[in-house]
Image: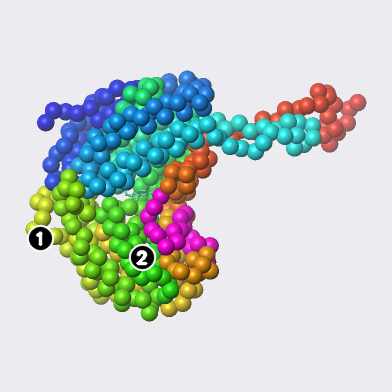
Amino acid sequence: MSQQELQYIGGARRLGSGEPLSVTAPATGEVIATGKGATAADVDAAVAAAKAAFPEWAGTTPGERSDLMHAWVRVLHERADELAAVESVNAGKPIRLAQEFDVPGTIDNTAFFAGAARHLEGKSAAEYSGDHTSSIRREPLGVIGSISPWNYPLQMAAWKILPAVAAGNTIVLKPSELTPLTSLLFAEAATAAGVPAGVINVVTGVGPVAGQALVEHPDVAMVSFTGSTVVGRQVAATAAGSVKRVHLELGGKAPFVVFDDADLEAAARGAVAGALINVGQDCTAATRAYVQRPLFDEFVGRVADLMDRVTLGPVEDPETDMGPLITRKHRDKVSGMVDRARDAGAKVVRGGRIPEHTHEGGAYYEPTLITGATQDSEIVQQEVFGPVLVVLPFDTDDEAIALANDTAYGLAASAWSTNVYRTQRASREIQAGCVWINDHIPIISEMPHGGYKASGFGKDMSAYAFDEYTNIKHVMSDITAAAHKPWHDVIFRAE
Ligand code: NDP
């Protein structure tokens, strides 16, 4: 296979100058691209391109940026099939998921930020002191360094790039080196739409080399990171060395609370979809179902039935419901956690193993349903990031809320009930950046996504993301034209 240029710097593809890099298809284990990883020198070149592009891009009007982003939307529509096919192969997603979720979601996000570019908000200018006009400017920060994970490569690239460039920043994105292909296509589509070279750059390389160099770079004004809590902590610590703004979207362990008046069929279906989306490699996936005791057995039975109907298969087959995990190494991690739960006395009601017949070379794992785990066990407390749902019983509403809040994470949660007071209470008291009521997973461009607690801070998507990617400047202009201002008398009284 010929070498591919996996870096996108200053509007052109380049070969990296680091170690050889192979990109493989998780469903087959086949190598689909080979190239070289980015080194600190490549990161430096990308940051220089972004820095050079910044003054002109920051100087465009919001309307000009909006027009270019709308043109980008049109290019993405034209290339939607290619984006879906590449995302499906590179990230191991069933083609249906790529076509119906990843790509349309990304295009909608781009369209949202094309419009939002013209709606930066702030307090109205006014004479708050009486003697001055105060006004607010929202200014781009400069070069943003972004680091994204492998689970939703295209959407994560979009979530990082769009608010940053809509607000007038330029950016260097480091995708996971496992899944760089659609991030590169997304950036190229922007250039094809007329976004100037250097505004969006992509460096493909490993975290400790390319990621570290980006976070440390003196010309990077802010680091926006999506990934695990462990690496997020390291990134924040490194960024603190040069006092960079940090935006962290980290791991999750979403609770799924089913009260005894819930629509059981809706809850069971919601649990299966919420736990198995993207093979559970979703930071908001339903991972811990707490079910009030009268519904417990029926809920477990219904979820098991539905899991039996999930079809594993090749990602290009439209009949496939669930593809592989991202790598065999990750599958070993998932299966190790399930094995330890089993050894500790939990019951594996469904799955809990590598499928026998299918998919040579791919990192497949069966949909897995677990009961009988204890609240303090690893499988309940730690992120599995696989197709694993643990179901635990509860008796009182107080207990349900306490259990839902009893992990280090706080990214997303759901509550299932037909009683409005119960759902309102759950939405008030569950500590998470998103609480769904009678659903689990849907996201929407107009609304923010972000965590509480060890799930990080800062918001992706929606106009709230602009709070991350702009500096707020207060301009206070004297309107009296007086040399002697009354407040001077507090300091000195010379006539
Ligand atoms: P990791 O934290 O392992 O990696 C995330 C990114 O950080 C990758 O690009 C990685 O590069 C890079 N990285 C690794 N080490 C460093 C370093 N020292 N300095 C700078 N960058 C580094 O996460 P995964 O890729 O495994 O993704 C899964 C995680 O992402 C889960 O915990 C999941 O919950 C979380 N996530 C959170 C979301 C949210 O919105 N809160 C959304 C999606 C996922 P490399 O790949 O080369 O190691």
- Write down the quadrant of residue 299 in the picture: bottom left
In the rendered view, does 184 fall on the left or right side of 317?
right
Whether ligand 1 has any atom under 8 Å from the Cβ at mark 2 is answered as no
The residue type indicated by label 2 comes to Ala
Mark 1, residues whose alpha carbon is within 10 Å: few (<14), some, or many (≥20)?
A: few
Which residue was labeled with disc 1? 356
- Magenta segment boundaries in residue numbering: 425-443
In the image, 395: left or right of 18? right
Instruction: Locate residue 90, reporting x and y percent.
Output: 22, 41
Viewport quadrant of the N terminus: top left
The answer to whether 242 is drawn above or below residue 315 in the figure is above
Badge 1 or badge 2: first in the primary sequence: 2
Residue 4 x, y percent position in the rendering: 19, 28
Residue assigned mark 2: 266
Q: Secondary structure at mark 1?
A: loop
Q: Quadrant of the C terminus?
A: top right
Horizontal placement of 181 versus 61: left or right? Answer: left
**Which of pointers 1 and 2 indicates the residue nearer the eye?**
2
Could you tell me which residue is drawn at 27 percent across and 48 percent down? 97
The chosen color scheme is rainbow
Q: Is residue 427 above or below residue 465?
A: below
Q: Is residue 419 magenta?
A: no
Disc 2 residue crowd, few under 14, some 14–19, many 20+, Cα 10 Å: few
Residue 224 pos. (x, y %): 42, 40
Residue 186 image-quadrant placement: top left
